[in-house]
Amino acid sequence: MNTHQLNIIYPHQVNLYKITSTVESVNGARIKYLNFRLTGKDFVGTLVVETSDKSGLKAIIKRMRATKVLASVINIRC
C-alpha cells in the first residue's frame, strides 16, 4: 500500500461526504487522515490517502476534478 498526502483546495458548497465517497469509490483506496479549514470562499486542507498502486492516486484526482469536488491540488507528497 502506498500513502499519499494531498494538500488541496475545494469549493465551500461541496460537502465532506462527497469528498470521502469520491475517494473511497476508487478501488483499493481509503482515507487515513482528513483535515480541512475554511479560508474565505474555499476550504483548504490535507487529505492523506492509502492506495494499492500509483494509478489509484491518479484515479482519485481525476474523479475529484470530473465531479467538481476539487478546485486545485496545491502539493502531492508520496
Image (cartoon, rainbow, N blue to C red):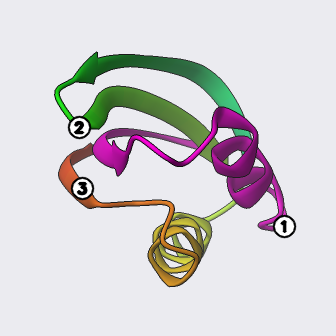
Image quadrant occupied by the N terminus: top right
Disc 3 from disc 1: Cα separation:
21 Å
**Numbered tag placed on residue 27 in the rendering:** 1
Q: Are marks 2 and 1 in contact (CB under 8 Å)?
A: no
* Mark 2, other Cα within 10 Å: few <14 / some 14–19 / many ≥20: few
Residue 78 location (% of width, % of height): 34, 44
Q: Judging from the image, what secondary structure is the residue with disc 1 in?
A: loop
Amino acid on which disc 2 is placed: Lys
Q: Judging from the image, what secondary structure is the residue with disc 3 in?
A: strand
Please tell me whether residue 43 is drawn above or below residue 11 in the rendered image: above
Q: Which residue is mark 3?
A: 73
Disc 2 from disc 3: Cα separation:
16 Å
* Mark 3, other Cα within 10 Å: few <14 / some 14–19 / many ≥20: some
Q: Judging from the image, what secondary structure is the residue with disc 2 in?
A: loop
Q: Which residue is mark 2?
A: 41
Residue 41 in view, yes or no = yes
**Residue at point 37% right, 27% down?**
46
Q: Tell me where the magenta segment starts and ends, as one range.
A: 1-28
Please tell me whether residue 48 is drawn above or below residue 71 in the rendered image: above
Q: Are marks 3 and 1 in contact (CB under 8 Å)?
A: no
Quarter occupied by residue 67: bottom right
**Is residue 70 located in the magenta-colored stretch of the structure?**
no
Residue 13 location (% of width, % of height): 49, 47
Quarter occupied by residue 22: bottom right
Residue 32 location (% of width, % of height): 65, 24
Which of the two labelled residues, at mark 2 and mark 3, occupies the earlier sequence position?
Answer: 2
Please tell me whether residue 42 is drawn above or below residue 45 in the rendered image: below
**Is residue 14 located in the magenta-colored stretch of the structure?**
yes
Q: Are marks 2 and 3 in contact (CB under 8 Å)?
A: no
